[in-house]
Amino acid sequence: MKVLVTGDSGYIGSVLVPLLLAKKYSVVGYDVDFYKKIADRKNVIFGNSYKRIIKDIRKINADDLRGVDAIIHLSALSNDPIGALEPKLTAEINFKASVRLAKLAKKSGVKRFIFSSSCSIYGVAKNGIVNEKSKVNPITMYAKSKINTEEALKKLSDKDFFVGILRNSTVYGYSPCFRNDLVVNNLVTTALAYKEIRIMSDGTPWRPLIDVRDLSNIFIKFLETKNKKVNGNIINIGFNKNNFQVKDLVNEVKKNVRGCEVVYTGEHGKDTRSYKVNFDKLKFFFPDVKQEWSLSKSIKDLVLNLNKINFSKKDFESRKYERLSVIESLIKERKLTKDLFINN
């Protein structure tokens, strides 16, 4: 099977692609490569291992999809701060370009389209634990772009065009294209940089969490499933035991970075985004899916890998692993236009 992975060199993609290659899939990577300078070059797979297309997702065409059997679509402006930078671009890239890609894929004879959505669409869950039937409450442009794309993709699914819609938990763990603008990763990097675990909210918000390796393996499950009932079905991705309050993450970080103080900065005040998520539907459709990377195991591995790349206070303060900072720098250097196209 020939699989095109958009965002192949990103945080998830650089973990997913090696897994696909190990399973003997023919992989085509598609990425604009905003973050190539921060990649751990010793561990990320580029170059001769598989074909890559370096191109903006808004410019993809039928020739790029020739011979492709399936698409795993990860490309997006990847978090809430970037979404706030220019809301219309989030809608343009995350929503319009995604739907355009899916329509083009269907027209080109691609059989499977696997979409990376987000549990952030639940926003503020006031009544207990949410599931796929719960009312969504997207409060950021990023979340709104995801729910709009989900709705459009559901309409495209049919017997000849399989659509997998994964509402992912917040991801954590080490990746060759690392990010520290994710809650667990951020807590670990502040601990390493300052010997302080800095909590920017009041610590009470709930988040569902998943390691990037567990998530990548679940993407492959969607790629391989023969269960027709999964087609067009929205499925929360994560594990029931991995719903945590932010303050509960602190103890796990303290176990692995000794001598840290806990500091509540109050920078974000009381973060209104809070949601506990039910993952029974995933277990129903994929009963063999198991969590391999618990929070504790992943944090231990994360500390180990960050020490290997000599992660420092300078790295933290330069914001080199924050997606918004990288994009702002590229615009300032005039390598990107304000519309986030590569400036040739």
Image (tube, rainbow, N blue to C red):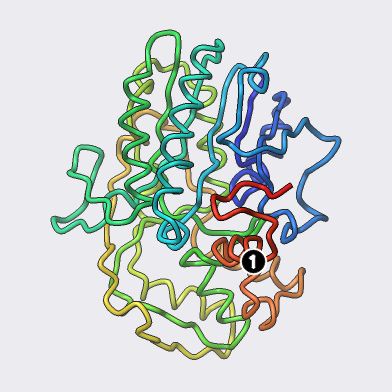
Image coordinates for residue 19, horizontal then vertical, percent: 67, 37
| Total tally of numbered discs in the picture | 1
Considering every residue shown, the one lying at the far left of the view is 127
Image coordinates for residue 52, horizontal then vertical, percent: 75, 34
Which amino acid type corresponds to the residue marked 1 in the rendered image?
Answer: Lys
- Position above or below: 8 against 297: above
Image coordinates for residue 320, horizontal then vertical, percent: 65, 69
> Image check: 198 left or right of 148?
right
Residue ID for mark 1:
332
- Position above or below: 70 against 134: above
> Image check: 136 left or right of 242?
left
Image coordinates for residue 195, horizontal then vertical, percent: 58, 88
- Residue, x 51% and y 37% (percent of image)? 218
Classed neighbour count for the residue bearing mark 1: other residues with Cα under 10 Å, few (<14), some (14–19), many (≥20)? few
Closer-to-camera residue (131/269):
269
> Image check: 9 left or right of 197?
right
Q: Element at badge 1?
A: helix
Closer-to-camera residue (300/73):
73
> Image check: 11 left or right of 133?
right
